[in-house]
Image (cartoon, rainbow, N blue to C red):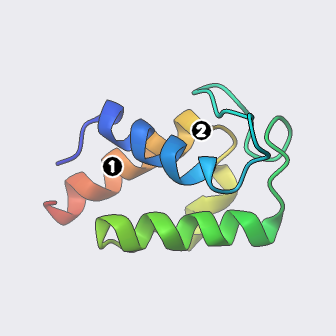
Amino acid sequence: MATYDDCLKLVRQILGEHLEPGQTAGEKDALAGDLGLGSLQMLELVVEVEDALDISLPLNQLPELQTVGDFARMLVTVTGESGA
C-alpha cells in the first residue's frame, strides 16, 4: 500500500512534466483552476500515473478530482484495494 506522501510526491512529479517551466504543484492547488490543466492533460496525467503504479483508476471518480491532494488520496485508496 502506498502512503499519502508517496502518492502526493508521484502526482507532483508527473504533474511537473505538464506545467509551465518554474510552476510547481502544491497539495491544495486545483488541477484545472490553479494549474490550468485541460481535459486532455488530465487524461495524460491519469495514464502516466496508472503506468507508474501499474493500476487502473476508476474513471467514474475522475470528475471528483479537484486538487492535487484529491488525486493523491484516490491513489492511496486504489493502491490499498489492489494490494500494491
Left or right position of 78 against 74: left
- Please tell me whether residue 25 is drawn above or below residue 80 in the rendered image: above
Spot the residue most to the front: 21
Secondary element at image label 1: helix
Pick whichever of labels 2 and 1 is earlier in the sequence.
2
x, y percent for residue 14: 53, 54
Question: Residue shown at 20%/65% (left/top)?
Answer: 82
Mark 2 vs mark 1, foreground winner is 2
Q: Quote the CA–CA distance across marks 2 and 1.
A: 15 Å
x, y percent for residue 8: 43, 37
Which three-letter amino acid code belongs to the residue tagged 2? Val
- Please tell me whether residue 8 is drawn above or below residue 39 in the rendered image: above
Picture quadrant of residue 51: bottom left
The front one of 54 and 18 is 18
Question: Residue shown at 45%/63% (left/top)?
Answer: 49
Q: Crowding at label 1, few (<14), some or many (≥20) Cα neighbours within 10 Å?
A: some
Secondary element at image label 2: helix
Which three-letter amino acid code belongs to the residue tagged 1? Thr
The front one of 43 and 52 is 52
Disc 1 target residue: 77
x, y percent for residue 10: 41, 47
Disc 2 target residue: 68
